Amino acid sequence: MTNLDPTMAPRAPAPESGHNVLAIASGKGGVGKTWFAITLSHALAKRGKRVLLFDGDLGLANIDIQLGLMPRYDLGSVVAGKLTLNQAATTFDTGGFDVIAGRSGSGSLANIPASRLQLVADDLVLMGRDYDHVLIDLGAGVEKAVRQLARAASTLLVVTSDEPTALTDAYAFIKITAIERPDATLKVVVNAANSTREGERTYSTLLKACQGFLRISPPLAGVVRRDTRVRESIRNQIPLLTRYPNSEAALDVEALADRLLAE
Ligand SMILES: Nc1ncnc2c1ncn2[C@@H]1O[C@H](COP(=O)(O)OP(=O)(O)OP(=O)(O)O)[C@@H](O)[C@H]1O
Ligand SMILES: [Mg+2]
């Protein structure tokens, strides 16, 4: 039973981060985190994995909208103490994975107290034991609440595009994470690249900054090419891997999922 009131009876201790929990982060907004989190969840589910996708964008939750889901419950009810986190999960049948929707429409969870957010994060790690992978779609930026939720994950995929502002913000996220959590695994995803080659060049720019200033070398999880069918499938609320399974972006995410599983 979820216990969101810190004054209530003691709970079973939760590990701070789940070994199977993966956070999708970025510095800058709009680089494709939510789309990528959905598509990676789908790719992992296609490989027979049990996947839970958690909408951790507390300000502007929108996984349900991209998926065309009308979840009966969302994180708002959990935070309000009306539901357990388990009860708030909805199965997204088309993708074969479970989703915990954030609150969309009915207000934001951006101002949730840190103690409550921590209880949600702890519960997510515990609930994640019933899954092979838990993916957290984080909000943009490096604010405290984003970092706190990210702490539930042992691995962070930092998404960037080739825009200089996206790169500097990705670097800022990597820097703060490397300082706060030297034990966390950081990897880079270059999204919406003009070509695989260009994406690799974008990665090497970021890598040089990480090596030069932070003395770390976060590996490249993969490059996802810019693809007009991404927007089209979002507009139609049909997942890319269903609508255009052979599109470049779909193939790139599938390959990235294979690499993640091969480790
Ligand atoms: N590989 C891609 N090719 C083409 N367009 C893309 C690609 N990835 C994402 N997009 C476009 O970028 C838009 C923003 O994506 P998304 O909402 O996933 O970003 P986000 O990082 O989650 O944004 P926010 O920071 O606001 O949460 C999508 O609507 C989609 O049209
Ligand atoms: Mg998003």
Image (cartoon, rainbow, N blue to C red):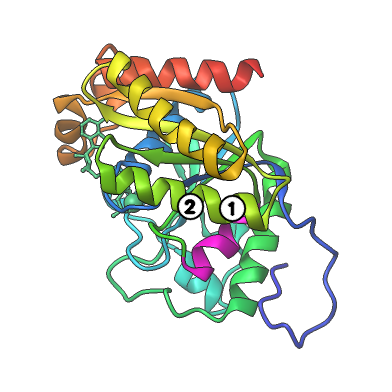
The quarter of the rendered structure image containing the N terminus is bottom right
Determine the quadrant in which ligand 1 lies. top left
Left-right relation of 217 to 249: right
Q: Which residue is drawn at 82% across and 71% down?
A: 11
Give neighbour class at mark 1: few <14, some 14-19, many 20+ (Cα, 10 Å). many
Query: Which residue appears farthest toward the front when viewing the image?
Result: 212
The x and y percentages for residue 183 are 73, 45
Q: Is residue 68 visible?
A: no
Residue under the point 60% across and 26% down: 49
Question: What's the residue type where badge 2 is placed?
Answer: Phe
The image quarter containing residue 106 is: bottom left
Q: Tell me the residue that label 2 is attached to.
A: 173
The magenta stretch spans residue 63: no
At 79% from the left and 59% from the top, the residue drawn is 14
Q: Which of 22 and 134 is in front in this view?
A: 22
The residue lying toward the viewer, choosing from 189 and 197, is 197
Circle 1/circle 2 CB separation < 8 Å = yes
Circle 2 SS class? helix
Magenta stretch: helix, strand or loop mostly:
helix
Find the magenta span and give its range.
143-152
**Residue position for label 1:** 177
- The local crowd at label 2, few if under 14, some if 14 to 19, many if 20 or more residues have their Cα within 10 Å, is many
Q: Is the CB of the residue bearing disc 2 within 8 angstroms of ligand 1?
A: no
Q: Position of residue 28 (x, y in %)?
A: 33, 52
In terms of image quadrants, where is residue 200?
Answer: top left
Q: Amino acid type of disc 1?
A: Thr
154 horizontally vs 170: left or right: right
**Would you say residue 148 sits in the magenta stretch?**
yes
